[in-house]
Image (cartoon, rainbow, N blue to C red):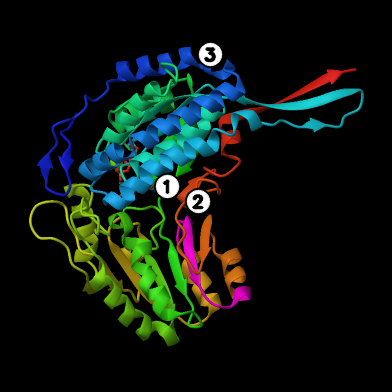
Amino acid sequence: MSTLINPTTGVELDSSPASASLEDADTAIARAHDAFPAWRDVAPGERARLLRAFAAVIDEHLEELAQLEVLNAGHTIGNARWEAGNVRDCLNYYSAAPERLFGRQIPVAGGTDVTFHEPLGVVGIIVPWNFPMPIAAWGFAPALAAGNTVVLKPAELTPLTAIRIGELALVAGLPEGVLNVIPGKGSVVGERFVTHPLVRKVCFTGSTGVGKQIMAGCADQVKRVTLELGGKSANIVFADTDVAAAAASAPYAVFDNAGQDCCARSRILVQRSAYDEFVGRLQTAVTDFRVLDPADERSEMGPMVSAAQRDTVQRYLDDATVAFTGSAPDGPGWWLPPTVVESTDTSEPVWREEVFGPVVAVMPFDDEDEAVALANDSDYGLSGSIFTTDIGRALRVARRVEAGNLSVNSHSSVRYWTPFGGYKQSGLGRELGPDAPNAFTEEKNVFIAH
Ligand code: NAP
Ligand code: MG
């Protein structure tokens, strides 16, 4: 394995886990397959109890997990605590699922017809580096609740919290082989999830390019696949709103996690009559945005995850006209300041492409139709925000924007109890919410003749 580096300091970490080989991946998949029948047959109430025990152990280790993420990924300590807590909360939420995996009884002639939700078997979860803990849990919590076993590949850059969570599963009493964490390369371990016939579903979160390859690879075995890919989400600000409040909240919607967030509202559309006021207030908010050592409790943004990711973002900025920036620490580590670009051309890369860094592009619009057209002029469709005091307009626009997750007069983050996923090239399928366990099952229909 390539050595892990603390993104805040640029210094190598002590612990770099060994990178799994193809044989290691096959061994782990076989272990998960062997563990499946017994896990499937654990009584619903007992599986529920084990998931709650797992949640409790995560909670006992919340600070340890959070500190590990600060070290490995440069997340602010406040965010990292939320992320570890999100793993706990997902487990608690889906611990209710084993006892509620309801089928239906459907009226038929000459007999009784019932449906069952049966687990798939081994589920492969491929996790990116931007939210290592939550994205892992959004996959494994409902998958385990539905009676599947899991092989999980963390991103090469950020494996440490996933490895620890795998150990904590055993501490909580989950049987060996039920949740298997396999750190390794995407091209080796991740790819093996796609090609191995005993892996029955792949949940992938990451770039749209790799997602397309995974979908194509899964086609060979008609393997189930869920994709959570990129985004270029719009924050639409109408002039009738509280412009000061909209401008004050906009930086949090894009610069959180240094912009390395698939839901980042990285395009801001502002109605022309409010544009100058909005941009002026945005500049104040960006100047005040606290980019500090992520271990500092006051920090609102830390470094980028890697030198390579910082360089990728810097290349977008080299080609764009920057209006203003906030601040960032000097010295070592992969820092970039929050950066605002005023766009006039929708073909500019910084307007069209997922930059995945602390960069936002702002553009004026004239009316509702133009706002919707600009928002929808994207291959992506993950999330978005609408600021207006007109409830009719809020609902009209929310219905017309082609995106899976919209918030009105807010920038809601992902909630584990509501469905999450993208339109268009932002993904396929939905995660989270009350129906997520069903996505890890086959629906079986049984007719019993009278
Ligand atoms: P990526 O290559 O898509 O990586 C995501 C995950 O997929 C990682 O675990 C990666 O493993 C694995 N992977 C890579 N190639 C694979 C393959 N051929 N088969 C199976 N698994 C494979 O993303 P990235 O390179 O880290 O980031 C590039 C860009 O993707 C970012 O700049 C951003 O635009 C986007 N991104 C989006 C999200 C999101 O949440 N939507 C998250 C991360 C990145 P390795 O760690 O070994 O590469
Ligand atoms: Mg990659």
Tell me if 354 is positioned left or right of 111 in this view.
left
Tell me if 77 is positioned left or right of 434 in this view.
left
Residue identified by numbered label 1: 229
Q: Is mark 1 within 8 Å of ligand 1?
A: yes
Q: Is mark 2 within 8 Å of ligand 1?
A: no
Most distant residue in the bottom direction: 273
Vertical side of 362 occupied by 264: above or below: above
Whether residue 215 is visible to the viewer of this picture, yes or no, is: no
The answer to whether the residues at label 2 and label 1 have Cβ atoms under 8 Å apart is yes
> In front: mark 2 or mark 3?
3
What's the CA distance linking mark 1 and mark 3?
A: 33 Å
As for residue 383 lying within the magenta part, the answer is yes
Tell me the magenta residue range. Answer: 378-392
Label 3 element class: helix
User: Nearer the N terminus, badge 2 or badge 1?
Assistant: 1
Q: What amino acid does circle 3 point to?
A: Ala
Label 1 element class: loop
- Identity of the residue drawn at 27% across and 22% down: 20
What's the CA distance linking mark 2 and mark 3?
A: 35 Å
| Residue 38 numbered mark, or none | 3
| Residue 422 numbered mark, or none | 2
Image quadrant of ligand 1 equals top left
